Image (spheres, rainbow, N blue to C red):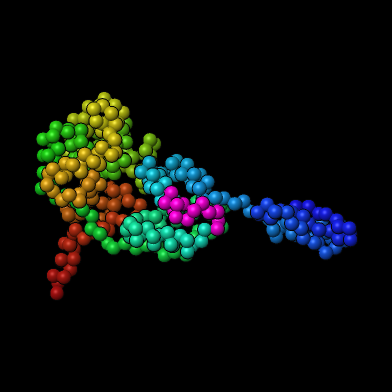
Amino acid sequence: MYLTKRSNGIYHIQFFKLDGKPTTITTGTKSKKDALKFLQKFQIENKRKPEFLLNDIKQKFLIHSESIHSPTTNRDYKLTLNKFLRFTGNKIVSEIISNQVNEYLQYRIKKSSTYQGRKDYIYLKSFFNWCNRLDFTETNPLNKIKPIKIPEKQPLFFTKKDFAKLCKVISQNKDSDLLDLTIFAVYTGLRRGELLNLKWNQIDIESKLLFLNNTDFITKSKKIRTVPLSKKAIAVIKRRNRIDEFVFTKNGLQFNGDYVTKGFKKYVIDAEVNSKLHFHSLRHTFASWLVQKDVPIQKVSKLLGHSDLSVTQIYAHLTVNDLQSSVSVI
């Protein structure tokens, strides 16, 4: 962008449009001093902001996500952003508007489910908040979109009887490593990632405590927490062979997440219990059994490592003692 002087003595500003085409605009003056003032004002008013394409920013965000999220969460971010990119095209991030995002979310709800739509809403809002903080965008297009509500759903959990049937089937198949993992999971409430990345140096048998310190594996809540170990959980630890840095291994190697998920599901089917139960149901079982024994929901929330008590409220329906005593007075 620079000044040029025409044959009639009037100064013009010559510059290039966004499409690369050269163009000029008159300053309307023959005075170089006034023309420079006009140029300065014009430059301020027409200052171009850098344009960032969605695909490029997506790549930057995933590098950031990898450093703060678990591999599973980072993978979910990647899936959501890839689907969003295919739906919208490789647009300039700052030009994406609320209506485009809303259309994508409605498409996901229709093609998949309300649960998936809500998950995409959460991930996209987080992504655009990050874009806003780093000045890739001026606003978050999801701020104008109402959060997607999902119907309340009771968590599936094992009854004591069904859990015993499951353990019997796993034992009969001589899968002692997965059996230990299963029992430890149901008596600690740890997530799959926390279990598979658990190391011996995180366990203090004497104090009966387990430490999730975010050193080698970042927990979902990203918070350091201490988990007390019950007698049954300690019994599992004591019978494990310390042949590797990881507590739970298969044939001396760290457990593979997909193997655990699929292998566990096979045993659930073989045990002829509810086929909808899966490995994460062990965490629900831990919480449900505690609530059924009248452990306060606040303590259950801390044991699960929930960042918000409202998340734990899904188990509140399992205890009706207080409510029963309340209606008994009339």
Residue at point 83%, 54% (across, down): 4
Residue 181 x, y percent position in the rendering: 22, 37
Would you say residue 93 sits in the magenta stretch? yes
Q: Is residue 285 visible?
A: no
| Main secondary structure along the magenta-highlighted residues | helix
Q: Residue furthest top?
A: 243
* 76 vs 188, nearest the viewer: 76
Residue at point 14%, 37% (across, down): 170
Residue 174 x, y percent position in the rendering: 14, 32
* 77 vs 207, nearest the viewer: 77
Tell me where the magenta segment starts and ends, as one range: 82-95
Count the marks: how many? 0
- Can you say whether 53 is above or below 71 in the image? below
Q: Residue furthest front?
A: 21
Q: Is residue 22 left or right of residue 125?
A: right
Residue 126 x, y percent position in the rendering: 45, 53
* 253 vs 55, nearest the viewer: 55
Residue 73 x, y percent position in the rendering: 38, 46
- Can you say whether 57 is above or below 313 in the image? above
* 31 vs 309, nearest the viewer: 31
Q: Is residue 53 visible?
A: yes
Residue at point 55%, 56% (across, down): 94
Q: Is residue 37 left or right of residue 307?
A: right
Q: Is residue 192 left or right of residue 213?
A: left
